Image (cartoon, rainbow, N blue to C red):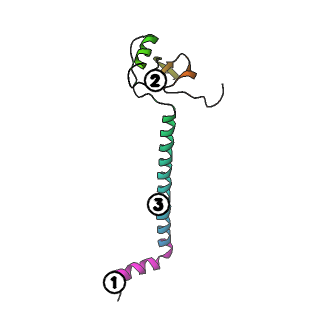
Amino acid sequence: MKRPRFQKVVSDLWGNRMRSLLVVASIAVGLFALGVMLTIYDVTMQDMQRGYAAVDPANISFQTALFDQDLVKSVEEINGVLHAEGARIISTRLEVEPSHWIAISIKAVKDPGQMQINQVRLQEGV
């Protein structure tokens, strides 16, 4: 003997077959979309981590007053320091539209091709 509640559910599902099918289809599409979004998130995060690691990012960065190359050499001789590089960083503003300014930092290095930390790689062009 079937319970009345079960009979009511079966009756409603069977009586509104198209509506029941649409509900099942919308749930399936939602689950599929969620799976796609989670997969894209996972792939993107892994790719970003690999890309960041590929530039050999700096572990520690110091900003000081003007210094000479001897200071960089002495820092590189400290036990546990693999590479040390000096660079000049200038902070300024750039007017992108009339009366609309953005803050930018310009990093100047002696030879970008010789950088071992925070490497910049040319994607295309000269």
Residue 25 visible within the image: yes
Q: Secondary structure at mark 2?
A: loop
Kind of residue at disc 3: Leu
* Residue drawn at (51%, 42%) of the image: 47
> Residue 106: x percent and y percent?
50, 20
> Residue 44: x percent and y percent?
50, 44
Query: Where is mark 1, residue-wise?
Result: 4
* Residue drawn at (38%, 15%) of the image: 64
Query: Where is mark 2, residue-wise?
Result: 83
Image quadrant holding the C terminus, namely top right
* Residue drawn at (48%, 44%) of the image: 46
Instruction: Check residue 31 in the rendering and tell me which mark sits there, or answer none.
Output: 3
Q: Nearer the viewer, residue 9 or 98?
A: 9
Q: Earlier in the sequence, mark 3 or mark 1?
A: 1
Q: Range of the magenta residues?
A: 1-19
> Residue 57: x percent and y percent?
46, 30
Instruction: Check residue 44 in the rendering and tell me which mark sits there, or answer none.
Output: none
